[in-house]
Amino acid sequence: MGIDTSNYTTSIALIDEEDNILLDLRKMLKVEKGKKGLRQQEAVFQHISNLPELINSMEDRIDFSSICAISCSHKPRNIKESYMPVFKVGRGQAIIISKLLKATYYEFSHQEGHIGAGIMYNELKDKNEFLSLHISGGTTELLLVNRENVDFNIDIIGGTLDISIGQLIDRIGVEMGLTFPCGKEMDYISKKGNILNLKVPVSIKDDTWFNLSGLENYFKKLLYDGNFNKEDVLASLFNSISSCLLEIIVKASKMYGIQDILITGGVSANSTIREVLKNKLNRENISTYFPNIELCTDNAVGIAYLGKVKTFSR
């Protein structure tokens, strides 16, 4: 069983020993229209309300006594100083449930959960080293992942120096009057557009690092100018993001001599990003792996999977 209480989703998942997903329960946190996010105390309160509701919905669907391990996400990343209050909610519930069921208890970072969900159905689960790109509302990081038995050693080797890609997308979406989080609706709108023939400013530094605030200002200006329709602006936005990511991935692949990359996080569900990166990285002989669409956004499946791996490796 896995529990994840991220910034915007309360999640519980249950998988069996063969990685079949038995339950994948999620409840999005509510964000008022026009707002660009939630304060931590608001998110914590909603998780406290959501978790009992999700657990109660499991009652007639599973045999609780069959659960042998409870895992949770207890912090954003697996580094010492990483901390967010929202993860305390899931951690507290996971500890209580594990004690009541006499089940083994494990902790993982939220980022490890995304990696777990991304490797559980492909050959990366058997590889000791690969690159990973985590692109979400709060994170845009290029990672070097090394496995030691069943544990991950993760080093940040690139990514954004200011706002995340998810923040860029949501800020533009809210500016358009869309409801936060905006990525899914913006993806749908962009499919009706064409890429504009414009010189978009992209600031890449030291090969694998970049800034996005310039893109935010540039694309907001395109919307305000009124000379372009929103479908074309969004198609161009996602194409520009894809080009930026493509450049840093290719450079990192050459720097570290690694030809495999896993791309995870909510933004990895975007259809343009998936298509552009998969096609163009293939031409660079880089094998690209995406989770299934439903496992890109925040979920507890990867956390449950990592707990299963640890349980059966003991």
Image (cartoon, grey):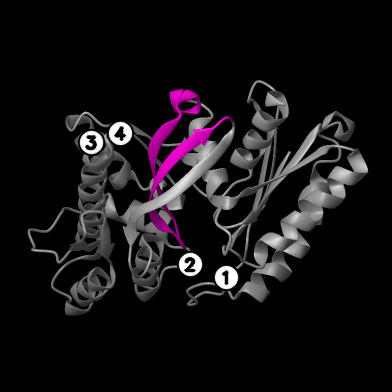
Q: Are marks 2 and 1 in contact (CB under 8 Å)?
A: yes
Numbered disc 3: secondary structure = helix
* Residue 162: quadrant of the picture: bottom left
Q: CA distance from mark 3 to mark 4?
A: 12 Å
Regarding residue 10, the answer to whether it shows in the image is no
* Residue 235: quadrant of the picture: bottom left
Determine if the magenta segment contains residue 156: no
Residue 173 position within the rendered picture, expressed as x and y whole percent measured from the top left: 37, 68
**As shown in the figure, which amino acid type bears the numbered disc 4?**
Ile
The residue under label 3 is 281
The residue under label 4 is 258
Of residue 199 and residue 174, the one placed in the foreground of this image is 199
**As shown in the figure, which amino acid type bears the numbered disc 3?**
Leu
Look at 57% across and 44% down and name the residue there: 113
* Nearer mark to the viewer, of 4 and 1: 4
The residue under label 2 is 180
Of residue 86 and residue 125, the one placed in the foreground of this image is 125
What's the magenta region?
Answer: 123-149
Q: CA distance from mark 1 to mark 3?
A: 36 Å
Residue 291 position within the rendered picture, expressed as x and y whole percent measured from the top left: 46, 36
Numbered disc 2: secondary structure = loop
* Nearer mark to the viewer, of 2 and 3: 3
**As shown in the figure, which amino acid type bears the numbered disc 2?**
Phe
Q: Crowding at label 4, few (<14), some or many (≥20) Cα neighbours within 10 Å?
A: some
Q: Say if 40 sits above or below 204 in the image.
A: below
Quarter of the image where the C terminus is located: top right
Of residue 80 and residue 260, the one placed in the foreground of this image is 80
Nearest to N terminus: mark 4 or mark 2:
2
**Numbered disc total:** 4
The residue under label 1 is 31
